[in-house]
């Protein structure tokens, strides 16, 4: 990371990643636990998708390695999208009425 602008945008993307994976509960401890479980459940899928995308991009760039900052940015981007889809799925109540 070179400039202050890049540092700010990196930390902002990390914050947005956490914000999109935030799950609210009745109290602070419940919210932290639900958010941690959400990240724990989605991180392997997000990391796998990011790994495949990074491998493809490096292959297309004739094997030049991607900077770690760029790798984390891709992880955050895929995590934001996944967090959005999971939040829509959970808050829409899909599958709630099917349980007995």
Image (cartoon, grey):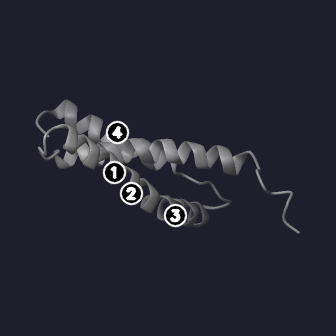
Which comes sooner in the sequence, label 3 or label 2?
3
Mark 1 and mark 2: span between their CA atoms? Answer: 6 Å
Q: Are marks 1 and 2 in contact (CB under 8 Å)?
A: yes
Looking at the rendered structure, the secondary structure element under dot 3 is helix
At 16% from the left and 37% from the top, the residue drawn is: 61
Name the mark nearer the viewer: 4 or 3: 3
x, y percent for residue 78: 42, 44
At 37% from the left and 46% from the top, the residue drawn is: 76
x, y percent for residue 38: 54, 60
Instruction: Check disc 2 and report the residue beneath it.
Output: 48
Instruction: Check disc 1 and report the residue beneath it.
Output: 52
Which comes sooner in the sequence, label 1 or label 4?
4
At 27% from the left and 40% from the top, the residue drawn is: 10
Q: Are marks 1 and 4 in contact (CB under 8 Å)?
A: no
Q: Nearer the viewer, residue 53 or 39?
A: 53
Q: Residue furthest right?
A: 100
Which comes sooner in the sequence, label 4 or label 2?
4
Name the mark nearer the viewer: 1 or 3: 1
Q: Quadrant of the C terminus?
A: bottom right
Q: Nearer the viewer, residue 54 or 9?
A: 54
Mark 4 and mark 2: span between their CA atoms? Answer: 23 Å
Name the mark nearer the viewer: 3 or 2: 2
At 49% from the left and 41% from the top, the residue drawn is: 81
Residue 23 sits in which quadrant? bottom right
Which comes sooner in the sequence, label 4 or label 3?
4
Instruction: Check disc 4 and report the residue beneath it.
Output: 12
Query: Which numbered tag is attached to residue 41?
Result: 3
| Horizontal relation, residue 78 to residue 23: left or right | left
Mark 1 and mark 4: span between their CA atoms? Answer: 24 Å
Which comes sooner in the sequence, label 1 or label 3?
3
Looking at the rendered structure, the secondary structure element under dot 1 is helix
Mark 4 and mark 3: span between their CA atoms? Answer: 22 Å
């Amino acid at each position: 990371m070179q400039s202050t602008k890049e540092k700010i945008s990196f930390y902002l993307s990390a914050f947005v990643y956490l914000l999109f994976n935030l799950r609210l509960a009745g109290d602070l401890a419940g919210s932290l636990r639900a958010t941690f479980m959400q990240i724990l459940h989605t991180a392997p899928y997000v990391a796998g998708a990011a790994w495949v995308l990074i491998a493809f991009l490096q292959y297309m760039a004739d094997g030049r390695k991607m900077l770690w900052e760029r790798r984390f940015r891709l992880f955050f981007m895929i995590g934001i999208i996944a967090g959005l889809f999971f939040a829509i799925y959970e808050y829409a109540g899909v599958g709630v009425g099917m349980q007995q």
